[in-house]
């Protein structure tokens, strides 16, 4: 089956808002029909949640009356409410997998409190198998973005071994110039970043949607999508935009990696060699100096496509346009 990917997003003005009996405000997106029957959906959003306010995100399949809750979110180190939701067999933390492939969907945001503000919400839907062969390079020249290096292992004594996602997002935010330093010396507090995306239900900091929501609050724009292959990622590098990519791989299959195997890990794609090798910042490296890693194109593409379906976080400022050639993925 051909691989299908479609990302769509809306602002608050695009949907319908109504007051609910419990006093919350519910915003509902238009129905979205991506043109294929999808089997997975990942949502991402940008909201402002002042103190004591939060939002609930849910999705509904076309033809169904059931809403599937995808998470409760509020920002800050002491959120009013932030957690993924358990108990729905179709939802695994940040991914909705409809029991039957769905032809359409809509999203709902419930805003609790008087002042939360929805700026943008979107979702990527996918169906079909990822490509099984290594993609050919889009360009035969080296392009590497200067992205600051951070190692999660610097913080291993206080939990950093599990902080690959907030560490990777911190690196991209530093590149965008939108992550304030923690001290006057310019150092970045990865522990603080971890607190800002922690998901108590998942018991960790790897919730894709939560990391994207935090990034959006600082950079202005952030969303989750899936790419067809590394040629799509090269387009972002050509546009000057590093990506946070989700990978998973068995023992020894990503040669040169600081971690021999993983069932889920986040790294920054920061460039490509002239031969198509993938230049990354891998936060699992033991020191900041050793964070930069260049991986074989085939090794990395398999770990990324087979490990997460090609999932990336796209983080950018308003003055950083997205590249052309999206094929529906952005």
Image: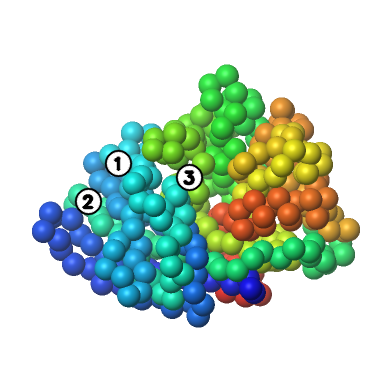
Residue 42 image position (x, y, % from top left):
47, 59
Tell whether 106 sits left or right of 282: left
Tell whether 19 sits left or right of 239: left
Q: Nearer the viewer, mark 3 or mark 1?
A: 3
Q: Is residue 226 visible?
A: yes
Which residue lies under the disc numbered 3?
Answer: 207
Q: Which mark is residue 81?
A: 1
At mark 1, the secondary structure is loop
At mark 3, the secondary structure is loop
Instruction: Quote the CA–CA distance across marks 3 and 2.
Output: 21 Å
Q: Which mark is residue 68?
A: none
Instruction: Quote the CA–CA distance across marks 3 and 1.
Output: 15 Å
Residue 198 image position (x, y, % from top left):
44, 37
**Badge 1, how many Cα within 10 Å: few under 14, some, many 20+?**
some
Which residue lies under the disc numbered 2?
Answer: 112
Tell whether 225 sits left or right of 78: right
Indicate whether 24 appears above or below 262. Answer: below
């Amino acid at each position: 089956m051909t691989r299908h990917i479609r990302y769509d997003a809306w602002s608050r003005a695009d949907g319908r808002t109504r007051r609910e009996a419990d006093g919350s405000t519910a915003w509902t997106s238009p129905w979205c029909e991506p043109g294929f029957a999808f089997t997975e959906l990942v949502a991402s959003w940008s909201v402002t949640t002042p103190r004591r306010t939060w939002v609930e995100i849910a999705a509904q399949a076309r033809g169904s009356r059931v809403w599937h809750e995808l998470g409760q979110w509020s920002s800050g180190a002491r959120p009013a409410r932030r957690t993924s939701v358990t108990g729905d067999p179709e939802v695994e933390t940040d991914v909705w997998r409809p029991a039957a492939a769905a032809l359409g969907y809509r999203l709902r945001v419930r805003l609790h409190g008087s002042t939360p503000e929805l700026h943008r919400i979107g979702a990527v839907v996918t169906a079909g198998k990822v490509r099984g062969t290594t993609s050919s390079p889009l360009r035969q020249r080296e392009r590497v973005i200067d992205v600051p290096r951070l190692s999660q292992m610097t913080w291993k004594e206080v939990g950093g071994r599990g902080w690959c996602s907030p560490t990777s997002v911190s690196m991209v935010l530093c590149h965008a110039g939108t992550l304030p330093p923690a001290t006057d010396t310019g150092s970045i507090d990865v522990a603080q970043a971890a607190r800002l995306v922690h998901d108590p239900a998942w018991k960790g900091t790897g919730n894709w949607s939560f990391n994207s929501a935090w990034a959006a609050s600082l950079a202005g724009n952030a969303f989750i999508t899936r790419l067809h292959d590394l040629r799509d990622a090269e387009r972002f590098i050509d546009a000057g935009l590093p990506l946070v990519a989700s990978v998973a791989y068995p023992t020894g299959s990503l040669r040169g990696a600081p971690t021999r195997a993983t069932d889920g890990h986040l790294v920054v794609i920061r460039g490509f060699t002239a031969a198509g090798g993938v230049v990354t910042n891998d936060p699992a490296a033991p020191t900041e100096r050793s964070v930069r890693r260049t991986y074989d194109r085939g090794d990395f593409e398999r770990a990324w496509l087979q490990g997460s379906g090609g999932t990336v976080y796209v983080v950018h400022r308003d003055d950083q346009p997205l590249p052309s050639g999206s094929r529906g993925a952005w």
